[in-house]
Image: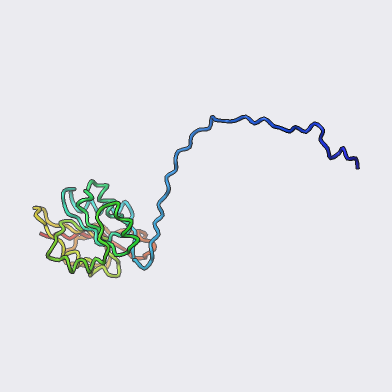
Amino acid sequence: MKANVYSRPAKPLWVSVKQRDDFEKLAKAEPIEIVAVDKATECHVTPDNVADRMVSYLGPTGDYLTLEPSAGTGQLTKALLRSGHSQFELTQIERHIKLAAGLHKFGPVINRCFLEYASEAVGKVEFPRIIMNPPFREVRPHVKAALSLMGQNGHTEPATLVALVPITFEHPDAETLEVLPSDTFAAAKVNTKIIRIVKG
């Protein structure tokens, strides 16, 4: 075979490239916050729409010291802030170290077991508003402890507790506000409802 078959005598050594600068600017993509929760925490993340409704059941926004006893990822706290509640009137309690670390941006956090906190705080502090999604397996002691901290704290309006609990939970003073769809907490496989207890 002839050698000239493999040669290109007129091969260009440079190619001109036109620089383009007429691209449209892309909108900055915001990262999606991925919430990973250890199964052992029994933290069931409250959907935004459910959290917003729970806050509305507490009553009008005001200067009410509000307790979130099992703050978890802060879903109920965020709903309180969206409604206009002051972060300086919040008390968030969360025993899981990593979850508690993520709550500081929303307001004060106490990193400990709520049941232990309540046993020490009873008679020393009163919360006119309590909003909670307690661990489903320990719902009764958590609601009982929360009720021990409820009080008007100088307000004329009665103290109010709103909680998301398993559908089997019963309390003589509890008013059932909503029975939630069965897929509200798909991972938990527990049917739930929203209750309200008013005191004072």
Along the viewing direction, whichever of 111 and 51 lies nearer the viewer = 111
Q: Nearer the viewer, residue 154 or 102?
A: 102
x then y, percent, for residue 115: 23, 68
Q: Looking at the rendering, in which quadrant would you find the C terminus? A: bottom left
Q: How many marks?
A: 0
**Quadrant of residue 158 in the image?**
bottom left
Q: Please provide percent x and percent y for residue 131.
A: 23, 58
Q: Is residue 74 left or right of residue 143?
A: right
Q: Seen in the image, is 11 located left or right of residue 60?
A: right
Residue drawn at (32%, 64%) of the image = 96
Q: How is the image coloured?
A: rainbow
- Percent across and percent down for residue 85 are 22, 48
Location of residue 76 with respect to 113 vertically, above or below = above
Q: Is residue 15 above or below residue 121?
A: above
Q: In what quadrant of the picture does the N terminus appear?
A: top right
Height in image: 32 above or below 26?
below
Near-viewer residue (172 or 123) = 123
Q: Is residue 81 left or right of residue 197?
A: right
In the displayed orientation, state which residue is furthest to the front: 13
